[in-house]
Image (tube, rainbow, N blue to C red):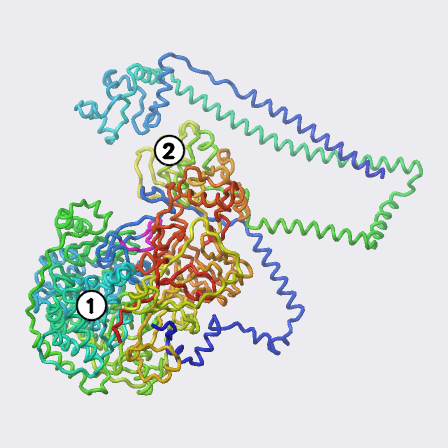
Amino acid sequence: MRSISLVFRRIAQSLLLVSTLSFGFQQANAQAPAGGAAPAASSGGGDAAAGAALFKQKCTSCHALDRQVVGPALKGINGKHSKEWLHKWIKNSQALVASGDAEAVKVFNEYNKTVMTPFPELSDADVDNILAYVEVGETAKPGGEAGAAAGTGAEGEAKKEGISNLMLGGLILIVVVALLVIVVLNRVIKTLDRIILQKQGVLPEGEVLEESTAVRFRRLAKNKKFVFFVIILLVALFGSLGWKAMWNTGVHTGYQPTQPIKYSHQLHAGTLKIDCQYCHFSAYKSKNAAIPSLNVCMNCHNYVTASDKYNGEISPEISKIYKALDYDPQTKKYGNNPKPIQWIRVHNLPDFAYFNHSQHVTVAGVRCQECHGPIQTMPEVYQYSPLTMKWCINCHRTREVNSKGNAYYDKVLKVHDQLKKGEKVTPAVLGGLECGKCHY
Amino acid sequence: MESNKKYWKGLEELQQTPEFVESSKNEFAESLPIEEVLSEAGLKTVTPRRDFLKALGFGVGAVSLAACQKAPVHKSIPYLVKPEEVTPGVPNFYASSFNGYGILVKTREGRPIKIEGNPSCVLGEGKLDAVAQASLLDLYDVAKLKGPRLKGEDNTSWDDLDKFVRAGLNQASGKQIRIISSTINGPSAKGVIADFIAKYPNTKHIQADAVSYSGIIQANQSSFGKAVVPHYYFDRADVIVSFGADFLGTWVSPLEFNRQWVKKRNMASLKNKKMSRHIQVESGLSLTGMNADARIPVRPSDENLALINLYNALGGAVPAQKLASPKAEKAIALAAKELSAAKGRALVVSGSNDVAVQTIVNGINSLLGSYGTTIDIANPSYQYSGNEADLVTFVKEANAGQIGAVFFMNSNPAYSFPNAKEFSEALSKIALKVSFADRADETASLCDAIAPSPNYLETWNDYNPVAGYYTIVQPTINPVYNTRQPEQSLLIWSDNATKNYYQYVKATWEKNILPQAGLTWRQLLQKGVVALPAAAGAGAAFAGNVAGAAQTIVSASGTLNKGGEKTLQLSLYPSVALRDGNYANNAWLQELPDPVSKVTWDNYVAINPKHADELGFHEFENVVVKAGDRSIELPLLFQPGQAKGTISIALGYGRTHTGKVGNEVGRNAYPFLTFERGTFQTATSVEIERGSGRNELAQTQTHHTFEGRNVIQETSFKDYVNNPHAGSSKHGEHKDYDLWPEHKQIGHSWVMAIDLNACTGCGACVVACNVENNVPVVGKDEVRRRREMHWLRIDRYYSVQAEGRSITEEKELEDLEDDFENVTVVNQPMLCQHCDHAPCETVCPVIATMHSSDGLNHMAYNRCVGTRYCANNCPYKVRRFNWFNYWNDSRFDNYMNNEFTQLVLNPDVTTRFRGVMEKCTMCLQRIQAGRLQAKIEKRPLRDLEIQTACQQTCPTNAIIFGDANDPNSEVRKALGNERTYYVLEEINTKPGVGYQTKVRNTLEA
C-alpha cells in the first residue's frame, strides 16, 4: 500500500510542477499583446478629417488616391481641374458630359465611358471636405501613414502569432523536460528507498521483489473469477468503443478540407457582417445553398484587393479569383481562358436524401448557424453538425412549425387543432418523419 | 350490360395455356434456386471449416477497410459568371416547338431534362404524345456525329466541307440540283431554300414523306383546287366513320385528334348525356380501332369498296361492287343511316394514300356537309405536303445522269424508298451528295459529305403546322457536338446576305408574322406560339370526279384481290412509337409496348389467330412474306381483331444505320410499298410461307395478370343514360373488417381519378413517367423475362362481342364459332394504387414501404433489402424490382451506359440501384416542389397546381390527380362521379386511385 501512495504523491508532484510552469508562461503570454498593441496615432485636421470619412463612405469603391481603380487615381486632382468643374462633375458627371463640356467629354471617353455615380446629396461643403482630404492626402500623406499604421498592425499581429507559436513549442519542450526530470527523480528516489530498506535489513535482495510480482501475476492468472472479470471488462470496453466507432462511420463532423482559396467566413460574415444571403442567395429560393459564382465575388473584389496588407501587391488569395476569371486587374479586361474554381464540398448528404434549403431557411425560418454552427467565426469552414438522419429527425420532432402568417398552413392547422388540442405542431406531426418526405 | 363479362389480355390467358398458368403463379419469371439448395445434393455439400473461416475473415477485413474510408472528396464547381436567370436547383422553362407542337422545355443548370406541352399551343393545349415526350433522349444520343464528315473522314473542318460543297455546286452548274426533304412548313426554312434556289436556279426542292399523305393532297387538288391536307375537327363531329385512318395513333396529327375526339366522350360530355359515335372500318386492329364504338373488320380490298357503297348509300350513284363480307355490307348501310342523320355533324376519313379513295371520301364529306363544319379546307394543315412522285422522278433523272448535286434534309430515302437498291444506284451517279442527317444513316452513309445537323433542342427554327398558326423553336442548350444547322449551311453555300440563321429567323418573324400578332420578338420567345385569326372557312364546292374514282377503285380492288378469298392482303402501317422510323434509336420508344399488341423492340406479322390455325402456323414462328421479288422474314403474332385473310406489318423498323438501340430491330417493311397511280400504296397482296425457327416477341400483355379477377367495368351509352351507375359490379352489402388502423389524412390526401372512357391507350403517359422518374430501359431479353420496369403500364383487355351479344362465360368462349375478328377493347392504365390498407406495407420485413399522412405509399430505396415480398403481395402487380444497375451496366449498353446520356436523368429523383424495389410515387418530387412553392409564397395550394407527369401529358385528360381534402378539387369531383369504381374494391385495400366505367356508344342490338 505504501508504494501506491508513493506513486500517487509522485504523480501529483509532477502535475503540479507542469501546471505551475505552464501557468507562468500563459501569464507572460497574456502580457505580451498588451504591450504590443500601441494606440494608433489619429491624424487631426478639420475639413480633411470630415473629408476622409466621406471619402471612405462614398468614393473608395471606385477611387484610390495613388492608383487607378475603376476611376482614376485622385492624387493631384485639384491641380488638374478647376474647383467649380470638380463640384459639377462630382454631383452629376453625366449632366456635365451631356452639356458638352469638352473637358468632361474627354475624361468620360478616357475612362471607357464608365458612368460615375452622381452624388447630388453631397453639399458644396462636403465636396470641399473631400477635395481637402485628397489635397491633404497628397501633402501630409495621411493615406501613407494609415498604410504604415496598418502595416505595423499587421506586423504586430504576425509577431503575436509568432509568439504564440513559440509559446506552444516552449510549452511542449518544458513538459518533456519536466517529465524527464520526474522520471530521473523517481529513479533516484527508488534507489535511495531501496538502499534505506536494505540498510534497515527489511529487504535483503533487490531481485526478490520483482520475482514476487511475476509470481503474483501468475497466481492471478490462475484465479478464474479474476480472469472472467477481466475478460468481461475488456469485452465491454472494446464493445462500447466498437459500437461508437460503428455509429460514427460515415459521420464527418469536423470535416475541414483545404479549399483552393483560403476564403474566410470569419472575415466576410463575422468582421464585415456581409449577409449570408448576399452570396448564398439560392439558399432562400432553391434546394442548393450553392457556392457563389465568381461574378458575386467580383462585385467587391473588383476594387477590394487588400493590397494594403501585401505591400501594395494584390492579395494572393484574391488574385486566385482574377486568375480563375482570366481577369487582368491592370487593364480591367477579362480574357478568354477562364478556369472554374474547384471547391471541395464540406457538407455532403447521400444522394438518396433530398434536402431543400429554401424549405428550411425561407419557410421554417431556420438560421444558418443552427445547422452550420458559428460560421461567422470560422476562418475555414468545417462541418459542424453530424448531418445524420437521427440529427434531422430530432429537430423535426422538437421544433415548432413556423406557420405564423403562412396561409398554406391554415387549413391543416385548423384540422390539427380539432384533433389534438393545444399540442405543439412539429414537422413530425405534419408528416415530417415519413420516408417519402426526404427519400424519393 | 352484364357485369361478369369475360375480359382477357391475351390469347394465352383466354386459352389458359400451360405456360401462362405456370407463369401467372409467380410474381417473377425466374424463381430463386431454393429448391436446388434444399434438395439432397444441396444440403450435403460441405463447407470446410477453413473455407468458412477464410470467408469470414475476408468479410470482416473488407468491411472494416471499407469503414476506414475517409470522407470522400466531392468537388463543387460553381459558375464563373452565373447567367442571371439560372438559380442552381431551380428549373427554367423555355418555350420551343416539336414538329409544330408548342412545347415547354424544362432545363436544370442548362440541360434539358423534360419536355412538356405548351398550354398556349392550339394543337396540343399543353399535352404531348409519346414521341414528343421521348424526343428529349435524342439530344443525348451518342450515335450522332460529333462533327462534319467528308468522304468518310471525321477529322474535317467546316471550312473544308464548305470548300468541297461550293466546288461541287460550281461543277454542277450544267446539271440539276435537288434538295430532298420531308415536309418543311417553317417560313424561315422555306425562305432559306427559296434563297438557295435563287442563287442556284437549276435547283428544285423535293418534299417527300416516308409515310405520305399525297393521296389526300392530290384528291383535294382535283376536288377543290387546293393541294392541301385539310384541318379536321373531330370535336365537332357526332358521328365519325374512319376507313383505316388511325387518327388517334399516327394519322396526320394524332395528338390534336386525341384531344378533339375525347371532347364528345369525356366526363363533361357524358354529364350532359352526349357522346359521339365512332365507327372504324379497318383490316388490322389499330389504336383508333380499339377505341371505336363499333369496328368493322374488312380486308383492304373491301375497305375501299365499302367507301363507294357508303357514297351510294348516302345518295350518290357511281359504279359499285358488293363487298365480300355480308356483315360489312350491312354495317355500312347502318353507318350511312347514322351519318345522314347527323349531317353537318359528321366526319368520314380514310387512311388510304390513294387519290381515288380520297376523292370518294371528299365526295362523301361534301354530301354530309362536313366542309365548313368538321373539315376546314380554307385553313388547311401544312403538317404534310410531300409528294413522292417527285422522288420517283428524281430517281429516274439521276439514273439518266441529269442530276449534278443532291442535298438530303431530314430525309432518308435509302431506308424508306421502296426500291432502296434502285435509289442507291441512282445516287452513285450523282457527283455531289450531301446529307444533313445528325448521324451517318442509311442515306448519309452513301453521301460524300455529311454536314450534321444539331438536335432540335439546340437550334433556331420555326413551324407553320396549320394555316395561321406559327411556332418558334429556340435553343435550350448550346450545341453539344460540332454541328451546324442545315439552314445555316444553305445560307453559307448560297452566299446569303444574312450570315446567321438566327438573324434570318428573327427577320422573317419581324417582317411577316409579329406585326400581325402585335408581339415583339421577346414576347414571342416567352410565348412560343402565335395564332393569327383564321380565314373564313366557307363550305367548299366539290368538283371531284367520283364516278371515275369509283371505277379506278373497283379495278384496283380487283387487282388486289385477284386470287379471290384465298389472296392474302398485306396492309402496312406506321408504328405508334417509331412512326416512320425516324425515332428508331430512341430506347424509350423502342420499349414502349405497342398500344395494341403490347410488343416491344420488334415488328411482326399480325395475323388473325383462327386464320393462322387454318394455315397451320404457330405463334412467334418466323414466316417469310413475299410479294414478287421482295420478301422479309418476321415472326407471326396472333392478333385478335385482325380481319381474316389479311396481315399487317409496322413500318419504322429494320433500320441498319441509326445507332446501337435501333439497328437491326425488326425488319424494314418499306419495300412492300407500291408506287401506283402516282402515290405509294400501303396495301398489297402477298404470300407467306414458313421461315426458319422462332422468334419469341417481347410482349408485355400478360406479364402482370389479375388472373381473371374482374377489374374492368363497362357499360353502353344507352344504359348509362338510363342509369349513370350502370356497369358497376357491387358485391352486395357486407360488413367490412379491417386489419389496419384507419389513416387520418389531416393535411392533403393525394388521390387520382382515371377515366377509362377517355383513355385511348396511346402510351404518352408511360413515356412521360419514364422521363420524369428515371425509369430504366431494360431491353428485349429482360422484357421477355417479365422484368420491364415501367411504373405505369396500360393494360389492354379484349372481350369478344359476337352477333351483337357479349360473351360472358368461359364455356361460351369455347364453343365460339367466331373467328376473333370482332373484339372490343378496354384500356386500363395501371399504376401503384397507393392503398390506404396496403398489402405491401404489411409484409415488408424492414419497413421500407410506409404509408404517409397524405395518403401516399412511400418507398424508401435505401432501406429496401430486396426480399420482394411486397411485389408478391401486391394485388395490382405494380411493383418493380431492379435486377441490375440498369443505368450503369455494360449489359444495358443500349440505354445510358455513358456519361453523356446520363445527363438526361432527373436530378430530383434517385436512380435506383440493383436489388431494390420501386414503384409509382405519384411524382412525389413534384408534390414536394409544389407544396414548397405554396409555402414560400405563403398561400394555400391551388388545385391542379401539382400535376403528375402522366396527368400533365395525357392528351385526353383521362388522368386527374389532386387533393381529396380540397372540396373544390377536380379530382374530388371526378371521384364523386357515378361511374367511379375502385379496382379490387372487394379486398378492402382502399386504393387511392379511382377508375371511371368505360362507356361504349353501341348500337341497339
- Percent across and percent down for residue B382 are 16, 61
Magenta residues, start to end: B106-118
Decide: marks 2, 1 in contact (CB < 8 A)?
no
User: In the rendered image, which quarter contains the N terminus of chain B?
Assistant: bottom left
- Percent across and percent down for residue B127 are 28, 57
Q: Is residue B394 visible?
A: no
Label 2 neighbourhood size at 10 Å, few (<14), some (14-19), many (20+)?
some
Q: Is residue B903 left or right of residue B328?
A: right
Q: Residue A301 has which mark?
A: 2
Q: Chain of mark 2?
A: A
Judge whether residue A286 is colored magenta.
no
Q: Is residue A111 visible?
A: yes
Per the model, the C-alpha gap separating discs 2 and 1 is 73 Å
Q: Is residue B170 above or below residue B545?
A: above
- Percent across and percent down for residue B956 are 29, 61
Q: Nearer the viewer, residue B434 or A355?
A: A355
Q: Secondary structure at mark 1?
A: strand
Report the residue marked by disc 1. Answer: B239
Q: Is residue A430 left or right of residue B651?
A: right
Residue drawn at x 57%, y 50% is A249
Q: Nearer the viewer, residue B789 or B751?
A: B751
Q: Is residue B229 left or right of residue B975?
A: left
Label 1 neighbourhood size at 10 Å, few (<14), some (14-19), many (20+)?
many
Q: Main secondary structure of the magenta part?
A: strand
- Percent across and percent down for residue B511 are 12, 48
Judge whether residue B112 is colored magenta.
yes
Q: Is residue B913 left or right of residue B533?
A: right
**Mark 2 or mark 1, which is nearer to you?**
1
Q: Hey, which residue is sitting farthest right in the picture?
A: A201
Task: Look at label 1 and name its amino acid.
Answer: Val
